[in-house]
Each structure stands twice: as C-alpha cells, then as structure tokens.
C-alpha cells in the first residue's frame, strides 16, 4: 500500500507546485511574404519549446522551416526553396491557463535556392546563405483542463513572425498544431 501511495504522488504534481518543464512540440504551417523576388510562399516547420516554471515563463526554442514557390515572371519562371534553422528564447504568459500568449526572439540561418528558367531556355541556379534575427508572437490554446501543466495534450495556435537579415527578410503568418504541457 505504501508503494501505491508513493507511486500516485509521482504521477502528477501536488497542488500549487508546477511540474518540471513546460514543453511543446509544434508543427507550423502558413504563408511567408519575402523580399527575394518571389511574391511569397507557403511554409511548414517544426518547433521544439521548453519553458522552465521557476523562470517566470522564460525558456528556449529551436526551430526548422521549409518553403517552396514557383512563379511566372515577365522574362523567366522562378522556382525557389527555403531552408531555415534557428533558435532563441521565448516568454510564455499565463502559463497555468488554457490560452497562453507568447513572444520570442532569436537568430536563424537560412539557405535560399533559386532556379530561373529564362525565356530563351537557359537555366540559372543561385544559392544564397545568410543569417538574421527573428521575432515572433502568438498564442497557444491547450483546451483540456487535465492537460494544463500536468500532462501532454493537444495545442492549437497562431504565430506571426518576422526575420531581418542582410540578404533576406520576411514576414510569416502560421497556424500551429502540436502537443504540449
């Protein structure tokens, strides 16, 4: 019986005490407007987030994103692919509530591959690399009360993001789905 009582105490955190880390694994999907000569593109990505409860909602995030677009221009057809990896810090507000607004800042490294097929049939390939700073904000909704800070559960949200670098800038609006606590 003592083992059963001690085991039950390990399943969830006691009232008033936060469990160890808040964590989320999030898939993002949205649309990115950029300055690369392509009008914009769909983008998908993965974010991993850890928030330490004793740090007032502060934690860290790592992310990867991919996007592609094809566009007919006046004298060519341009195809572009974007690969991005980055990391930074995130502040989550209302950590114990179902709706959790957040802001984050960090740095990202991006590779942009463009292929231009000119009207005369020639093909021109170009690869640009560069880094930049990003900032984003949004809100996650973890709907079930049993999922709040105790167990993994469904997370839904929206994210608005911008990146500014020497060679590349964009604004992105994404919807977010994943699991978290």
Image (spheres, grey):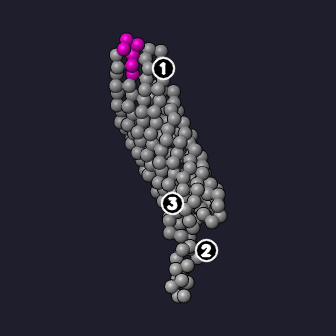
Q: How many marks?
A: 3
Q: Nearer the viewer, mark 3 or mark 2?
A: 3
70 in relation to 122, above or below: below
Q: Residues within 10 Å of mark 2 (few under 14, many from 20)?
A: few
Secondary element under disc 1, as helix, strand or loop, is strand
Q: Does the image show residue 122?
A: yes
Mark 1 vs mark 3: which is more N-terminal?
3
Residue found farthest to the bottom: 2
Q: Does the image show residue 106?
A: no
Q: Nearer the viewer, mark 2 or mark 1?
A: 1
Question: Residue placed at 51% from the left, 35% from the top?
Answer: 42
- Residue tagged 3: 23
- Residue tagged 2: 16
* Residue situated in front as seen by the camera: 146 or 85: 146
- Gap between marks 1 and 3 measured at Cα: 42 Å
Please indicate whether residue 63 sits to the left or right of residue 173 in the image. left
Q: Position of residue 6 (x, y in %)?
A: 52, 83
- Quarter holding the N terminus is bottom right
- Residue tagged 1: 72
Q: Position of residue 95 (x, y in %)?
A: 59, 62
- Gap between marks 3 and 2 measured at Cα: 19 Å
Question: Is residue 73 one of those drawn in magenta?
Answer: no
Tell me which corner region of the image, top left, top right, bottom left or bottom right, holds residue 91. bottom right
Question: Is residue 120 one of those drawn in magenta?
Answer: yes
98 in relation to 130, above or below: below
What stretch of residues is rendered in magenta? Answer: 116-121
- Gap between marks 2 and 1 measured at Cα: 59 Å
- Quarter holding the C terminus is bottom right
């Amino acid at each position: 019986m003592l083992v059963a009582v001690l085991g039950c105490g390990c399943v969830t955190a006691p009232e008033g005490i936060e469990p160890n880390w808040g964590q989320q694994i999030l898939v993002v999907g949205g649309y990115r407007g950029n300055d690369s000569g392509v009008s914009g593109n769909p983008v998908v990505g993965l974010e991993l987030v850890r928030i330490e409860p004793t740090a007032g909602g502060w934690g860290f995030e790592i992310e990867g994103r991919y996007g592609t677009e094809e566009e007919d221009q006046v004298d060519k057809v341009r195809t572009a692919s974007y690969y991005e990896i980055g990391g930074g810090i995130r502040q989550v507000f209302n950590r114990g509530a179902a709706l959790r607004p957040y802001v984050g800042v960090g740095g990202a490294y991006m590779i942009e591959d463009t292929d231009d097929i000119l009207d005369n049939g020639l093909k021109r390939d170009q690869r640009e690399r560069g880094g930049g700073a990003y900032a984003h904000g949004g809100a996650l909704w973890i709907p079930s009360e049993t999922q709040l800070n105790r167990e993994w559960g469904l997370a839904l949200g929206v994210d608005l993001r911008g990146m500014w670098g020497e060679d590349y800038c964009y604004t992105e609006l994404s919807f977010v789905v994943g699991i978290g606590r």
